[in-house]
Amino acid sequence: MSDTYSDRGNKDRSIANPRPGGTMTPSPGTGKPVHSGNAFLIGDTMTGGYGKGPDILHDCTIAVDPGEIAVIVGPNGAGKSTAMKAVFGMLDVRSGSVRLDGEDITALSPQDRVRKGMAFVPQTSNIFTSMTVEENLEMGAFIREDDIRGTMEQVYELFPILKDKRRQPAGELSGGQRQQVAVGRALMTQPKVLMLDEPTAGVSPIVMDELFDRIIEVARTGLPVLMVEQNARQALEIADKGYVLVQGANAHTGTGKDLLADPEVRRSFLGG
């Protein structure tokens, strides 16, 4: 984790529902290796694609443990979002597996994975624009049967602007505020892991920094965060671990700090 962010966030774990994860063990990679068969969430040597189409992922492995931010970066068309969708069950994993808290969930549908504790925020179409902010958050708690008011207050504490605009249609919000609604709605499930696909796409640098601050706060509660990001340099600055994908395969793996310092990664993916 970057020193810039090391003291940020809080340690209120009640918004999440984490379970103990495995200890990370070494495997080949760039910098400090981070793969582990014992990780809390792992897409392990995944090969697959959409329907009957060709393979897009090739022995791709990504993993994250409680309290960590894991970031997937790489060039356009590298399979970043595809890897995320594979972990969430949105395409066929023809070999390899996906495991959550030690349980093999490879065969489960995305809906069943949500009930297992996975929360996925897609890049686009991730809010109900005609509903108010508060109604969006209520929709996020559709699988819960307990009192959701405490979680909603925690979301409002994390994203104060949403409380101010809770009666306003979500479609009237700015792009950054909409992303806060989408993340807040995902948190309403009290997930075991939060997955974000390009959360800062299309927002200004100032809004991007604010969103990253909030993501750090979420991770500080103990919730694992797995994120795909096009803004590679900024994402790796907050990442506990990073995965650089090229053509659907792992090209470089390491801590965010080590990947930022790696000459080949800097030259090939970060502009020198």
Image: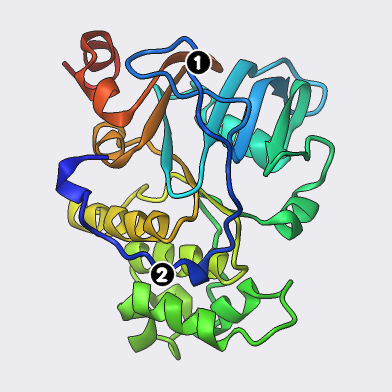
Classify the position of the C terminus by image quarter.
top left
The quadrant of the rendering that contains the N terminus is top left
Indicate the quadrant where residue 49 lies. top right
Left or right, residue 55 beside residue 135: right
Circle 1/circle 2 CB separation < 8 Å? no
**Is 21 positioned to the left or the right of 34 in the image?**
right
User: Tag 1's secondary structure?
Assistant: strand
**Position of residue 234 in the picture relative to residue 120 (left or right):** left
Q: Which is nearer the eye, 19 or 269?
A: 19
Q: Amino acid at mark 2?
A: Asp
Residue at 29% in and 18% down: 269
Residue 132 in sight? no
- Residue 80's x, y, as percent? 51, 29
Q: Which mark is residue 12?
A: 2
Residue 193 place in picture, x, y as percent: 57, 52
Q: Badge 2, how many Cα within 10 Å: few under 14, some, many 20+?
A: few
Q: Residues within 10 Å of mark 1 (few under 14, many from 20)?
A: many
Q: Which mark is residue 50?
A: none
Residue position marked by numbered label 1 in the rendering: 250
Task: Name the kind of residue labelled 1 in the image.
Answer: Asn
- Which residue is rendered at x = 82% and y = 43% of the image? 108
Is the residue 191 above or below the residue 41 in the image?
Answer: below
